[in-house]
Image (cartoon, rainbow, N blue to C red):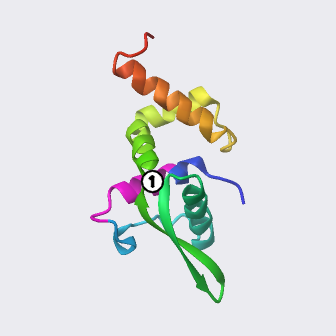
């Protein structure tokens, strides 16, 4: 299954905007994504250390449910929260069909945040 970098961001934002760390309060976009796609991306975010997630075994297979952001997840969300910055970042990274490595996206986001804070010159 191919990674969708916009879905990755949307999952992180949904977790951040939840009322608490209870999985039931996290609202993922089921209109545009199947349960399988969401579960795959949640598992990948968990494995990448950006979120905590819970694996449940069901008759149809494993289902991953987001639980909370990790410190690293909070850091990344802080850098990509703004929609305009996100679009600019993807364009700079050359994201086409979600093929840019996540580490490049993260590095560019950090660089932009450092410039905004006056730590780097433009």
Q: Position of 46 compared to 114: left or right? A: right
- Residue 118 image position (x, y, % from top left): 35, 15
Query: Going 63% across and 78% down the picture, which residue do you hit?
Result: 62
Query: Is 116 rendered above or below residue 45?
Result: above
Q: Label 1 belongs to which residue?
A: 12
Q: Which residues are magenta?
A: 9-20
Is residue 53 among the parts visible in the rendering?
Answer: yes
Residue drawn where x is 45% and y is 11% of the image:
122
Main secondary structure along the magenta-highlighted residues:
helix
Q: Locate residue 94: give its quadrant.
A: top right
Task: Give 32 or 62, whichever is nearer the viewer.
Answer: 62
Q: Position of residue 78 (x, y in %)?
A: 38, 40
How many neighbours does mark 1 have within 10 angstroms: few (below 14), some (14-19), or many (20 or more)? many
Q: Is residue 103 above or below residue 53?
A: above
Queried whether the magenta region covers residue 14, the answer comes back as yes
Q: Nearer the viewer, residue 45 or 30?
A: 45
Q: Is residue 88 visible?
A: no
Number of marks present in the image shown: 1
């Amino acid at each position: 299954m191919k990674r969708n970098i916009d879905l990755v961001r949307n999952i992180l934002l949904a977790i951040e905007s939840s009322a608490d760390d209870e999985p039931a309060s996290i609202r993922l976009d089921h209109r545009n994504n199947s349960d399988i796609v969401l579960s795959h991306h949640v598992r990948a975010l968990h494995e990448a250390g950006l979120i905590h997630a819970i694996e449940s075994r069901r008759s149809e297979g494993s289902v991953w449910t987001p639980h909370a952001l990790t410190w690293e997840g909070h850091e990344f969300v802080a850098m990509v929260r703004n929609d305009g910055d996100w679009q600019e970042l993807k364009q700079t990274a050359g994201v086409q069909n979600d093929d840019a490595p996540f580490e490049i996206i993260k590095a560019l986001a950090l660089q932009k945040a450092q410039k905004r804070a006056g730590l780097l010159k433009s």
